[in-house]
Image (cartoon, grey):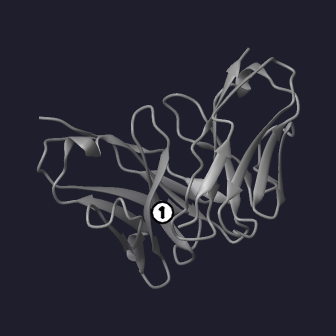
């Protein structure tokens, strides 16, 4: 199985900060990596697909990059609506494994 | 536009059986796969397994092998997740998901399953 190691598990930041969340895959997964935002009681919302493609309707302050087996999600200037939990997901293999999640909190 | 619509919330007793559904529209229900994801209250996302829509081959994550069954009826563009013997620990939100040719992912709205005596 491919393991996805996501860090940090919790992140405290101010509105306006630039933040980065990282996911490392245990094997090569090509660029089949997605990022989601989830708020309590809601379904996950797709932000980024294929590592760096911004989903339609998602603000451009969100971006994704890939380097080998390391993937990052960056939010360039945090807005109040961005405080949520973020997950990465690989979909290169049929297990579709997820990272453990990063809870982004207001400092 | 590609859309996945899931069946409504269910309340069941331990030992009962259940089949929930995920209906696709807006695309050819023949490519790639439909996956099922579990999320228990306050917890992360867990991949349960998936079914390939070209050959109906199913793959299950080790934690769910033998516990659930995934199937599809292509004639009505619908995938299913089924239990034959529900347990209280199956109480969770369940999501279906798929992808398109560009690699974009799509999710259903979720089905809440509550198992309680």
Q: Is residue A89 above or below residue A26?
A: above
The residue carrying mark 1 is B35
Q: Residue at x 70, y 50 (%)?
A: A23
Quarter that holds the N terminus of chain B: bottom right
Q: Residue furthest top?
A: A107
**Depicted B72 relative to depicted B38: above or below:** below
Picture layout, residue A17 above or below residue B92: above
Query: Crowding at label 1, few (<14), some or many (≥20) Cα neighbours within 10 Å?
Result: many
Identified at 87% across, 40% down, the residue is: A60
Residue A28 percent across, percent down from the top left: 71, 70
B61 or B35, nearer to the observer: B61
The quadrant holding residue A107 is top right
Chain on which label 1 sits: B
Residue at 73 percent across and 68 percent down: it is B102
Q: Quadrant of residue A83?
A: top right
Viewer-proximal residue among B29 and B39: B39
Which residue is at a point 41% across and 51% down the rendered structure image?
B6
Residue A32 placement (x, y as % from top left): 70, 65
Give the x, y percent position of residue B72: 37, 71
Of the 4 image quadrants, the one containing the C terminus of chain B is top left
Determine whether, in the image, residue A3 is placed left or right of residue A107: left
Q: How many marks?
A: 1
Q: Quadrant of residue B26?
A: bottom right
Is residue B1 shown to the viewer in this render?
Answer: no
For label 1, the SS is strand
């Amino acid at each position: 199985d491919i393991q996805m190691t996501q860090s940090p598990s919790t992140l405290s930041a101010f509105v306006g900060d630039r933040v980065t969340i990282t996911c490392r895959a245990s094997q090569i997964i090509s660029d089949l990596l997605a990022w989601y935002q989830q708020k309590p009681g809601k379904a996950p919302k797709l932000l980024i697909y294929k590592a760096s493609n911004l989903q339609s309707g998602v603000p451009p302050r969100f971006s994704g990059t890939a380097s080998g087996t390391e993937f990052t999600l960056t939010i360039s200037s945090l807005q109040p609506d961005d405080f949520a939990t973020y997950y990465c997901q690989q979909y290169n293999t049929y297990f579709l494994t997820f990272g453990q999640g990063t809870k982004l909190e207001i400092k | 536009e590609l859309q996945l619509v899931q069946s409504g919330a269910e309340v069941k007793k331990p030992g009962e059986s259940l089949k929930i559904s995920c209906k696709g529209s807006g695309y050819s229900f023949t490519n790639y796969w439909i996956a099922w994801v579990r999320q228990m209250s306050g917890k992360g996302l867990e991949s349960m397994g998936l079914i390939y829509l070209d050959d109906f081959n199913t793959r299950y994550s080790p934690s769910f092998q033998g516990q659930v069954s995934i199937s599809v009826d292509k004639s009505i563009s619908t995938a299913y997740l089924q239990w034959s013997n529900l347990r209280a620990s199956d109480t969770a939100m369940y999501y279906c998901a798929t992808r398109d040719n560009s690699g974009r992912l799509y999710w259903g709205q979720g089905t809440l399953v509550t198992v309680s005596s």
